[in-house]
Every structure is written in C-alpha cells, then in structure tokens.
Amino acid sequence: MTVGTTRSRLIPIIVGIGLIEAIAFAWARLWARAVNGDVLFGLDLDAYRQGAVRLIATGSPYHDALLTGPIDNRIGNVPIAYLYPPPLAQTFVPIVDVSPALVAAVWAILQIGALLVLLPLVYRRFGGALTPGSVCAVLIVAVLSYPLNFAVYVGNLSGWIAIVIAVMLLGPGRPAGVAAAIMAVVKMTPAVLLVPAVIRRESRLAALVTVAGVTVASIVLAPYAWSQWLRVLPNILRFPAGTDTSNLAPGAVLGALGFQTAGTVLGLTLAAVALIATVVLAVRGSWAGSVAAATALLLFAPSTIWDHYLAILVPVLIAAWPGSDWRTRTTFVLFMVVSASGWLELETQLPVRTAYVVVTVLAAGAATAWLASRGADAPSPTTALA
C-alpha cells in the first residue's frame, strides 16, 4: 500500500471524526439546552404563532401596538412583534394549537435536513469535488457556524433565508425563482433576492408567478389582514434599531465607539454598493455574483444585525471556497473564527462586535468579487478543485 493510498483513506476518517466532534461540541454548547426547556429554543416562532392567534380572532395578525407606532426592538416584545406580511401568520394557523416545543423541533429538523443536502451541492456546483472527506468538511463548517446554529435554534427566519440563498446558488431556474419569491412574500426585506431572479430569464416567470399567486391567494383568504398590513407598514419601516449590545450593525457598533453618524453612513454606503452590484451583476449575467451581492445587502442595510442574521453568509462562503485564492479564503476563515465567539458568549464585547463588522465586510466583499469574476456560469460540478 502506497503512502498516497494510505493518506487518501485516512483523510475521510479523520475529517469524519472531526464532524462527530463538531456535532458533540454544538450539542453541548447549545442544543442540549432545548432538551431542558430553554426559553430561547424556538423563541421567534412565538411571534409567528401569536400573529396566527390574532388572525383567527380578529382577522388581522398585527397587535394594536403596531397601529399606534413602532414598538421597542427588544426580546420582551417578541409576542407582539409580528412584523411580516400576512402569509407567514396564515401558514401558522393550522398549527396554532400544536405544542410550541414540537413546532420548534420540527422547524429546526426541517432546516437542518435542508442544509445537510444543499450545502454540499453548493460546494460541488462551484467546482468542489464531492468526496466523503469534502462533504464532512462542508458540514463541519455549518455545524461550527454559531450564527447558523443559533438562527435555526431560535426559530428566526434567517435559517430559511440561508436555505433560499443555497437554492439560488445552485443555479438560475425555476427552483431559484420560486424560492426567492416565497421568501420575499413571507418576509419583506429579502425581496432583494428577487432582483437576480427576475432579471435572469430562466427564473423570471417562476418568480413572478409565485409572487402573484401567493399574494392573491393570501388576499382572498384574509383581505382585512392585508388592509391592516398597509396601516402598520409605516410603523414597521420605522422599527428602531436594537439597543442590545448584540447588535452588530455598523451604526450600532461604531455608535458604541462614539461614531454614530459615521457608522450609519458606512452601513448605508455598503448597502448602496451592494444594491448596485446586485443589479449590475444580474444584468451582466453573473448569477452567483448577483446572489452574493444581494446577500451582502441583507447584511448591511438593516439598522439591527443580530448575530444569527449572519447565517445567510455561510452558503455564499461555501460557494466561493473551492476555486478561490488564499487571500479570499483567509477572509472566510477570519469570519468563521470571529463568529465562533458566539459559542463562548463573547459576541456582546465591543472588540468582538467591531471585529464582526470588519470580517463580515471583508468576507462578503471577497466572496461577491470572486463569484462575480467567474462569469455567468459556475464551473462544471465534475471539476475537482479542493
């Protein structure tokens, strides 16, 4: 047996052991809490469920507090903070009486299953060779990503947005159009994902038909809810930035350093650049680059960026990894290292928050630039780039 043969057999085993250890670590640091009834498990699902309860009772999922003005952006307001178009609350109507713990468990399992399938496919789509070792390595990245874990754990839609982005990265087509459209209708801000989906011919019809079909069906089922949506929308658009020290938006972080205006300007500038890049790259036919730029826009535009929002960057980094150079990969590694601070509950520390802003900008920018440089089409899935 040659040294090369021995090495080729040992690497998958070593990486597989690493995956098992990563899963054990994530379980011990976070997921075991769910078994013990942690209130954070499925926390955000309560906003959707309470919206469904109000929808059944009044015909509108929106709390009266939203009619009088913006509510505070704090964890205590989750039960009244249904800030989305009506379709999400309508989705929860049939399961409103189901145990919240069961709903949270199923919600998490569905996302975990989707990510297990999609992330290795994204890696292959952009030139990575799918071997037992590479699949385990991709999954290790996902398992060790605190933002991705916490997004799924807390029940936030960020996990589903990451899944939609993964679907879109697999290529322009009907699935990409449908995925982008559903997320845009469910949560208003990801509508930017419709830009590449509508510009690209392969996904345009599916995206437009899905948006129209879901919206019309929702209006027919709950017309009063949509009239109330128009009433509360101005207050939702004025939803204040989170004052908690977990807010990783440039305005919040630089504001804590005494540069509030500079931070706000930086965030808006980054968002504007990302928006322009999304449109320009989509028009030029760079599908992956446009999806990556749209992802960056979702990370820069809001005045509140909780750590789990950064989950949406994971599929983009996995897509850009296979053929990227060492400089680009270095930014990805730095992002993973800094975001791992969440496992140690250090993300509220100002130096860590500052590092979050820096590495997110670097990683998102490098991934977008690299994917855009590869043109309209991804490499053949059979290209074996480690």
Image (cartoon, helix red, strand yellow):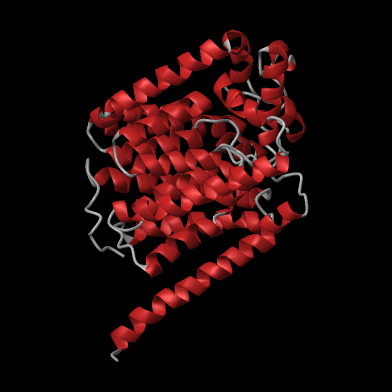
Residue beneath the point at 39% across and 69% down: 133
Q: Residue at x 58, y 30 (%)?
A: 303
Residue closest to the far bottom: 1
- Judge by depth and name the residue closer to the eye, 111 or 97: 97
Q: Is residue 140 visible?
A: yes
Q: Horizontally, is 272 left or right of 204 in the view?
A: right
Quadrant containing the C terminus is: bottom left
Q: Residue at x 69, y 54 (%)?
A: 345
Number of marks: 0
Left-right relation of 17 to 51: left
In this picture, is 331 found above or below 176?
Answer: below
Image coordinates of residue 362 in percent, x first then y, are: 43, 48
Q: Is residue 246 visible?
A: no
Q: Residue 307's spot in the image, x, y percent?
A: 60, 45
Left or right: 153 as drawn, with respect to 137: right
Q: Quadrant of the N terminus?
A: bottom left
Q: Is residue 122 above or below residue 194?
A: below
Residue drawn where x is 61% and y is 12% of the image: 225
Query: In the rendering, at what x and y percent does residue 272 appear?
Result: 42, 28
Q: Is residue 132 above or below residue 364?
A: below
The x, y position of residue 265, in whole percent, is 51, 29
